[in-house]
């Protein structure tokens, strides 16, 4: 079983749609959770951290369910510029340990 | 702040040659650097973790004699792909951490094509 698994995608949605991505992780020692955005042929860029109580940043909402080892990202009012691959990442929260990434889910927003 | 550079950004080389990729933290000291590899439509796969002044720790399945990692200073780590083969063609991304939890900054990546 892979450490971090994501919805296969791709997600093709019209502008203005709401779309949700899911991610599960297998290591129960995971303590930190993140969503990254990766554009084609570029490095991943941090979109937002995911906190236990859930958190929101504009049109983006992240949720964490520790019991189910599950993370989600909700994007409301999708924009064309949201088209990218969204990667979830987990870390066991020790200095010097690497982020472990999911395969990513591709989102394509069309007009 | 927290800028990481990689050089070169892309490279094409012939089979059998070696290629060196540099990763630099420009405005902080990176006690730990990580090397990832990403094949098309695949995830970033961690190859190795390197701490300044010590040998790198490689992930299972990554050949340490083929992917030589040197982290000689707090701002520079290098990855050398030795005797490159076409199947080594990939996007190599480094990231650097100043040693604080949850701080990991990515370089822009190096696209390697082996012909």
Image: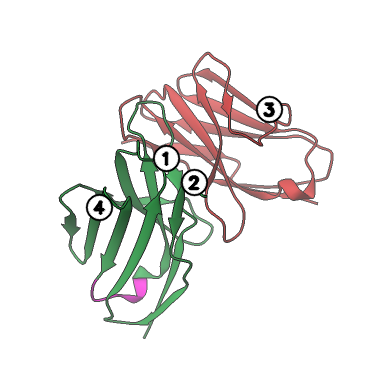
Mark nearest the camera among 3 and 2 is 3
Residue at numbered disc 3: B64
1 and 3 marks on the same chain = no
Residue at numbered disc 4: A64
Label 3 to label 2, Cα distance in Å?
23 Å
Q: Residue A70: image x %, image y %?
A: 32, 54
Give the color of chain A as drawn: green
Location of residue B40 (image quadrant): bottom right
Pointer 4 local density, CA inside 10 Å: few below 14, some 14–19, many at least 20: many
Q: Residue A57: image x %, image y %?
A: 19, 58
Q: Residue A43: image x %, image y %?
A: 47, 50
Instruction: Say which label, 3 or 2, has the lower sequence index.
Output: 3
In the rendered structure, the answer to whether residue A8 lies left or right of residue A72 reads: right
Q: Where is B14 relative to A62, above or below? A: above
Task: Tell which subunit mark 4 falls on.
Answer: A
Task: Tell which subunit mark 2 falls on.
Answer: B
Compare residues A2 and B54 and report the one nearer the observer.
Answer: A2
Location of residue B97 (image quadrant): top left
Residue at numbered disc 2: B108
Label 1 to label 3, Cα distance in Å?
20 Å
Q: Residue B18: image x %, image y %?
A: 76, 34
2 and 4 marks on the same chain = no
1 and 4 marks on the same chain = yes
Give the color of chain B as drawn: red
Magenta region: A76-81
Identify the residue at horizontal 54%, vertical 14% (top origin): B54
């Amino acid at each position: 079983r892979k450490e971090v698994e994501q919805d296969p995608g791709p997600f093709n949605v019209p502008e203005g749609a709401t779309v949700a991505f899911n991610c599960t992780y297998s290591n129960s020692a995971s303590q930190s959770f993140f969503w990254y955005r990766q554009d084609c042929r570029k490095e991943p860029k941090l979109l937002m951290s995911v906190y236990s109580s859930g958190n929101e940043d504009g049109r983006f909402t992240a949720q964490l369910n520790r019991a189910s080892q599950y993370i989600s990202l909700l994007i409301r009012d999708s924009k064309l510029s949201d088209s990218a691959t969204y990667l979830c990442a987990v870390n066991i929260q020790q200095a010097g340990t690497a982020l472990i990434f999911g395969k990513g889910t591709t989102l394509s927003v069309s007009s | 702040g927290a800028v990481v550079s990689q050089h070169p950004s892309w490279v094409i080389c012939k089979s059998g040659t070696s290629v060196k990729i540099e990763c630099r933290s420009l405005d902080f000291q990176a006690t730990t650097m990580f090397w990832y590899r990403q094949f098309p439509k695949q995830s970033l796969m961690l190859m190795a973790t390197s701490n300044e002044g010590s040998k790198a720790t490689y992930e299972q399945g990554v050949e340490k004699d083929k992917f030589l990692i040197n982290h000689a200073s707090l701002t520079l780590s290098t990855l050398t792909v030795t005797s490159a083969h076409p199947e080594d063609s990939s996007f190599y991304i480094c990231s650097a951490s100043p040693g604080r939890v949850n701080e990991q900054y990515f370089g822009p990546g190096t696209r390697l094509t082996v012909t």
